[in-house]
Amino acid sequence: MVGLAQTGTGKTAAFGLPMIQLIDFNSTQTQGIVICPTRELCIQISGDFDSYCHFIKKAKIVSVYGGASITNQIRQIKKGAQIIIATPGRLLDLIKRKVVKLSNVGYVVLDEADEMLNMGFKDELDGILDKTPKDKRTWLFSATMPGEVARIARNYMNNPVEITVGKKNSSASNIKHVNYIIREKDRYQALKRIIDYYPEIFGLIFCRTRRDTQQIAEKLMKDGYNAEALHGDLSQSQRDYVMRRFREKSLQVLVATDVAARGLDVNDITHVINYNLPDESEGYTHRCGRTARAGKSGISIALTNLREKRKLSEVERKAGIKFEYAKVPDGYAICENQLYAMVEKLVNVEVKHEEIGKFLDPVYNTLAELTKEELIQRFVSIEFNRFLNYYKNSNDINATVRKKEPAPMVRKQERKRSSGKKIQLNDGETKRFFINVGKLDNINAGAIIRLVCEKSHISAGEIGKIEILREFSFFNVAENVEKQVSKSLKGAKLDGRSVIVQLADKEKATIDDKPKFSKKFKSKAKRKKR
């Protein structure tokens, strides 16, 4: 069976409760397995199963995942586990160690199967499912149904029944989708303004890479925000600590990667902020589904620059939604919201008369000469002054949206980048640059465009022909931005890897110039690969 439904609608219960009814808990043999992509989701599903089995005394649910003690997990399984919740890598490891035996498994659940494929777990899934009986029941659950998941259904399932709740690949109807269009250099500033505009925010911020996630979280903490990062480079104990704080709401915002937050089930998340749009459009449905769970409402925000208009339209089409365009709040609106939120807190605060009574006489004496208006002004100013000082000279950071944008020349050159024809930019000269990454590094033209535009703050229209070779690449830029690109890309990193970018010797160099660079950089690329 294939079950498709928006996140937050109870898919865990949809496969958990039937499985528990079908399991023979008088036997200690493993009869059901649930495979999911991440440690957090594994722990979360295991906790849900424990709740469902609260009144079943003989039930033993064991969760196994990487980053935790395998010795403890082996000990628990050997005591007898009727249901195992697992990530693919750790489960396959335990199968090879002959700790987990799947010969009696009657029920297999693949939860968030599309993400497991995105994370490269295809071989592990094949290895696990090959060890299960052919007459088992396989249930696949997801919020979206991309082509990869359809292929899983064909390969591992026999004439599956597909059940869709709501519209396939869509987000919940009680989510408001908002788009802020900003200049790239103002992205972080816009994020801070949005957080400040919603004083009671309990939010999740999504970044594209682990490096960005850590950097944004550190910046927010440095600027006084109650934030933490969640990504794959953290140890299991660190991830558990961060998640515990977030669930207890001792954190206001959590900055996370898609993988780390996949399947994250935390109550009452008010806002999901897409600091960057996901690489795959289907990922937006999973992201925004972290809010508005169990029938509640929420807001999903997308920060985009002018070059991401096409990508935003693709997200709208695939998710079946429409973004509402809004302007990034100015300083006055932020201060107004903060003031009213603080006054509301003041009105609703619980006064413990007996506890504070013995401290009040000296306070009354000190404040006796102040009028009611002066008291209010001073109490409000204690907390409010920092917002007034910070935003008193704030500028408008919204990007100007033109009615009709010229088609970026980049798109044209991406389709023809191997043709060898030179693209003229504004009928002027171009300058050619070398970068020491290529096809072996799984680099495409889009990655180079993002790097150059984000670091140099130039538009995509100022980038010309891009040639991706085996171990390095070339790209052209308009002559008038040559110095700007050279300076900004010194010591740059692409997807966490340091890259070398330098001006090619010939201004109109072609692919034939590659031997000039290969001796200098090929050996370095090979060393890194080894």
Image: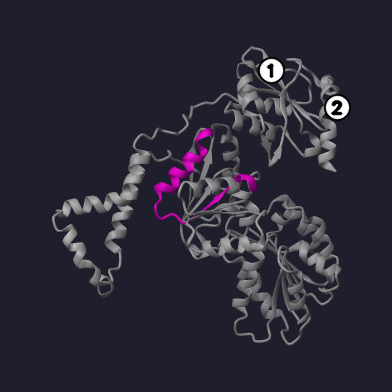
Q: Is residue 207 magenta?
A: yes
- In depth, the one of 233 and 255 nearer the eye is 233
Q: How many marks?
A: 2
Give above or below for 6 relative to 489.
below
Residue 223 numbered mark, or none: none
Q: Is residue 209 visible?
A: no
Q: Which range is magenta?
A: 185-212
Crowdedness of circle 2 by 10 Å Cα count: few (<14), some, many (20+)?
few
Q: Position of residue 160 (x, y in %)?
A: 74, 63
Q: Earlier in the sequence, mark 1 or mark 2?
A: 1
Which numbered mark, 1 or 2, is in the foreground of this view?
Answer: 2
391 to 282, vertically: above or below: above
Foreground residue among 166 and 341: 341
Q: Amino acid at mark 2?
A: Lys
Image point (73%, 55%), residue name: 149
Specify the quadrant that holds the N terminus: bottom right
Question: What amino acid type is highlighted by mark number 1?
Answer: Lys
Across and down, in percent, residue 447 comes to 69, 35
Q: Which residue is mark 2?
A: 519
**Which sits in the foreground, 221 or 467?**
221
Determine the residue positioned at 79% across, 56% down: 122
